[in-house]
Image (tube, rainbow, N blue to C red):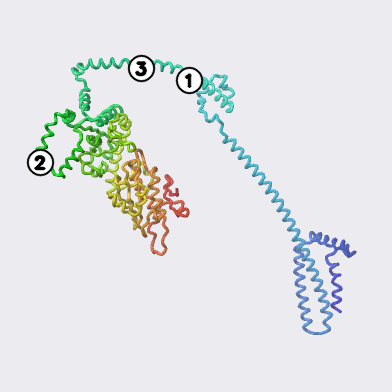
Amino acid sequence: MSSESSKKRKPKVIRTDGATPEGKRGKGDGDQDLRYYSEECEVDLRDPIKDYELYRETCQELQRLMAEIQELKSRGIKDNAVEIDERRVQSCVHFMTLKKLNRLAHIRLKKGRDQTHEAKQKVDAYHLQLQNLLYEVMHLQKEITKCLEFKSKHEEIELVSLEEFYQEAPPEISRPAITLSEPHQQTLARLDWELEQRKRLAEKYKECLTSKEKILKEIEVKKEYLSSLQPRLNSIMQASLPVQEYLFMPFDQAHKQYETARHLPPPLYVLFVQASAYGQACDKKLVVAIEGNVEEAKALYKPPEDSQGDSVAPQKRRRPTLGVQLDDKRKEMLKRHPLSVTVDLKCKGNNDLSSVGADENVLHLTFYYLMNLNVMTVKAKVATAVEMTTAISPKDILTLSDYVTELGHPYVWVQKLGGLHFPKDQPQHTVTADNTLSASHMELTVKLLRSRLQSRLALHKQFASLEHGVVPVSSECQHLFPTKVVSRLVKWAAIPYEDYAKLPYTKDVIEAGLAEDTHLYYMALIERGTAKLQAAVVLNPGYSTLPPIFSLCLNWKGERTGSNDDNIRAMESEVNVNYKELWGPKPGHQLLTNQLQRLCMVLDVYLETEPHDTSVEGPKEFPQEKMCLRLVRGPLRLKPFKFNYPQGFFSHR
């Protein structure tokens, strides 16, 4: 009975708790809406802290009632049922209170969320307005930048200075009262003045063209007069020959030279004439002379009957053996003309090579003519103040190696200086000396010979330093390298071509046709700690126009070459591909030593950027002393070999 009565009382508690007197008048949906609305209004009137205190007190009271009910039930007395029902009713009332507090808490939470959402929407609206304003500001800034960067065509015109403009321009154009205060009007006025000047210059140009045509006509008339004057001058010169002999004119020696030149063979004569003309007109340090026996040269042109008696005499002698006959035929085939032409090329003195005088370094060239072969040969000799320990002239020709010492070298450029041309596509039985061919090659050949001599003299000095383990770097090239380079050159020696070709890491250079037997080959050894870098060097005879080529092999924790290590290939690229950075001051004779110094530098970078082997105890063998932006880059893990001056750090290319 007590439980049924408690169930009947629960609806009363729900309707009366937390409801206003108006909520007790009806039980319809309108009353429920009113009650819900009243609770929302009640939330604003109630204090959350007091509700929290009520919640705590209600929970404590429920705990007390539950404990008393438990205690009464444990006694088992039937009279205690009434007390238990009373406490149940009180507990139900407290539960209703908790439900009401729970609803109020949910209403407060919903209101807090709604307020937060409204505030967030306001912030989002303000943020959107801010972004719109920022976008407008950015757009305006772009427009301002476009206006500021706008370049008008008049900016490309080189106008006269303001001072000159106001001095020369008339007042109706310059208008100083307006233009001095307004830059725009000033620019317009200057452009008007520029247009006016250009119109005047155009008229003057037309006048000059008219005057030029008139002068050209006068020149033509004078040319005709001079052409008629030449025969008269020739007759006067012939008449004045006795006077020249009587007065001992200074060109007598030159006249004798030209008299001797009459007996030169055509190629040597062409060479003599063109070299003498070039020396007189363009190069005062080029001296040309004729050497040899003039009488023997004259005897070559005697009639055949004069020499018949000599041809009979050998028949009375004993018949020579086959070997002697072949030797005589070779000598007859390689017989050269009795006269020869010598050309002395004097080079400016180099303080590093000579301290005697400005013309101490001389290249003596002696040109011969092989009459039966119809080719020219040359012998070269260098005279310097410093004794040369290595040969300056190129290597001997294999086909004439036994006779080169006596006859000279039959180079192609020598044939061109003599006017001889042997076309391969159209072989000719008789080749004659062409004067224009010699003239077209004379200037370039002389310049190349002089530059080759200077290059070899500079190389000789560099070799002397390299053989002592010193890499000379001039003050003009110091900025190409860091202050401290630890790797050092310990060996520099010349090697034959056969030894170079046997090296496994020089195969690519040979296959590319960059190494020939006429080139010079050297082996350099650079060391740092336990690392040894071998560099096989190919030196082209055209140094320094054509750079030396380096092939590298690093012996450190195995053998590393360009075929198995991408960084070794990058080191080769630093000296072989980027050699233009190392030319130094013209004509670039310091290229070789700069390449070796860069090789020492990149070896330092290679070793210092290698990762430390943690399995080995002790400090790192090569501590990093160079400043690098990045140690490696890309899938090939390339190292930073490029040195940046004056910052002093290394980076990737």
| Proximity of marks 2 and 3: CB atoms separated by less than 8 Å | no
On screen, residue 190 above or below 571: above
Q: Is residue 308 left or right of residue 469?
A: left
**Residue highlighted by disc 1:** 205
The amino acid marked with disc number 1 is: Tyr
Horizontal placement of 370 versus 96: left or right? Answer: left
Mark 3 touches mark 1? (CB < 8 Å): no
The residue to which callout 3 is attached is: 223
Quickly name the residue at label 2: 318
Q: Nearer the viewer, residue 458 or 251?
A: 251
The mark closer to the camera, 2 or 3, is 2
Q: Is residue 240 visible?
A: yes
Q: Position of residue 609 (x, y in %)?
A: 42, 55
For marks 2 and 3, give the CA distance: 70 Å
Instruction: Return the disc, 3 or 1, that comes first in the chain's sequence.
Output: 1
**Residue 553 lies in quadrant:** bottom left
Pick whichever of labels 1 and 2 is earlier in the sequence. 1
Q: CA distance from mark 3 to mark 1?
A: 26 Å
User: Within the image, what quadrant is residue 259 found in?
Assistant: top left
Residue at 21 percent of width and 20 percent of height = 249
User: Callout 2 environment at 10 Å: few (<14), some (14 to 19), or many (20+)?
Assistant: few
Q: For mark 1, does the 10 Å Cα neighbourhood hold few (<14), some (14 to 19), or many (20 or more) residues?
A: few
Q: Quadrant of residue 582?
A: top left
Closest to the observer, 306 or 419: 306
Instruction: Check disc 1 and report its element: helix, strand or loop.
Output: helix
Q: Which percent across, then down, holds residue 418?
A: 27, 32
Up the image or down, 248 lies above or below 320; here it is above
107 or 423: nearer the eye? 423
Which corner quadrant holds the N terminus? bottom right
